[in-house]
Amino acid sequence: MDTGYLILETGDVFEGTMVGKNVSSTGEVVFNTSMTGYQEIMTDPSYTGQIITFCYPLIGNYGINHFDNESIGLHLSGAVISDLCTTPSHYLAIKSFAEHLANEGIPCLAGVDTRAIVKKIRKNGTMKGVISKTPSKHVPIGQDNLLVKKVSTHSVQQYEGSGPHIVLVDYGYKKSMLEALLKVGCKVSVVPYSTTFEEMQSLKPEGVMFSNGPGDPMMVSSMFQEVKKITENFPSLGICLGHQIIALAYGAKTSKLLFGHRGGNHPVKEIESGKVWMTPQNHGYVVTEDSINHEIFGVTYRNINDQSIEGLKHKKLPIVTVQFHPESHPGPSDTEHIFKEFLATVGKAGDLKYATTK
Ligand SMILES: NC(=O)CC[C@H](N)C(=O)O
């Protein structure tokens, strides 16, 4: 196996062994602290354009199976790990971690002191990096672009059900989000990120869910007006990127965290009840504290570690948003009630006075 390197924007170089596809790759270097769930993480479209450093030291021990993909294909730009297990042991395993990456054309640097990378990122912030076969490669800074467009569906996809009709706006949705709706009998239409209010109206949804997705939410600013109109007229739930986009559509601002929240045990406090929930998270941006108009939105959840905003609720309309991942996969499903609460608002829509009628 060839020697390879991770070169960070700071100039730091980490040596390891190239596994997966033996190619160079550039991305934003982030870290994930989950102890399990590498398959779900690798297939989460929100990681598009990112090199994921897995903090848990052993990766690949239970292989890759047919069931845990969160989307079709892999979206990450590369992986950096400590110990690679090449002989997976699990009754559902169909291939190894390294085979999966190789088949999908993604490089991985193994045998690295991932703790040292995490320390660098925690100190200097998320930064660009390159996985390369030579230690001297230049790290291209590159422009952020509309990553959502790369991963969103191009056409409407329908899933039958006998329950309420929910439209899922696809910014790069995780399969578990769709499954959370199908499990309780919803009929679901998955629609492109660029769906307008008029197109939404023609689908006659009873509720709208705005999904997770990659990149800076400001990149989707061309859709903010439409998102505002949609949420003013249909009960809405925004998750992660969906949460950020809804907040922006109502005039709030977002900013980038120093090193993001990515892992399976981020504690959030529900403000109303005082309860603390354990949540899976994967985000680099947050809704900025003083940008919230408190006459319009109330803060419903806060991160225990840094007090950042983890949830919003519109004061008059049935609009709820969360920064964490109630759909789980990987990580705890303790906040599954978010879907139930959303579905409870669906169907009562006719009784509500919407902002557009004011
Ligand atoms: N999982 C997500 O939806 C991520 C949202 C956004 N791309 C962020 O990093 O903050």
Image: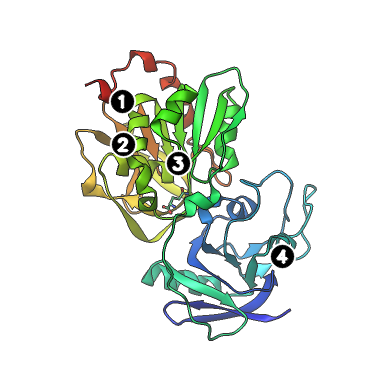
Q: In which quarter of the image is the N terminus?
A: bottom right
In the picture as drawn, the residue positioned furthest to the top comes out as: 351
**How far separated are the C-alphas under marks 2 and 4?**
45 Å
Give the image quarter of residue 51.
Answer: bottom right
- What amino acid is found at the position of numbered circle 4 in the picture? Ala
Q: Is mark 1 within 8 Å of ligand 1?
A: no
**How far separated are the C-alphas under marks 2 and 3?**
33 Å
- What amino acid is found at the position of numbered circle 3 in the picture? Ser
Q: Are the residues flagged by discs 2 and 3 in contact, CB closer than 8 Å?
A: no
- What amino acid is found at the position of numbered circle 2 in the picture? Ile
Residue hosting label 2:
271
- Local secondary structure at mark 4: helix
Q: Does the residue labelled 4 lie within 8 Å of ligand 1?
A: no
**How far separated are the C-alphas under marks 1 and 3?**
23 Å
Q: Are the residues flagged by discs 1 and 3 in contact, CB closer than 8 Å?
A: no
How busy is the neighbourhood of tag 1: few (under 14 within 10 Å), some, or many (20 plus)?
Answer: many
Q: Are the residues flagged by discs 1 and 2 in contact, CB closer than 8 Å?
A: no
Residue hosting label 4:
102
Q: Which of marks 2 and 3 is nearer the N terminus?
A: 3
Residue hosting label 1:
317
Q: Which of marks 2 and 4 is nearer the N terminus?
A: 4
Q: Which of marks 3 and 4 is nearer the N terminus?
A: 4
- Point 43% across, 25% down: residue: 201
Q: Which of marks 4 and 1 is nearer the N terminus?
A: 4
- What amino acid is found at the position of numbered circle 1 in the picture? Leu
Residue hosting label 3:
194
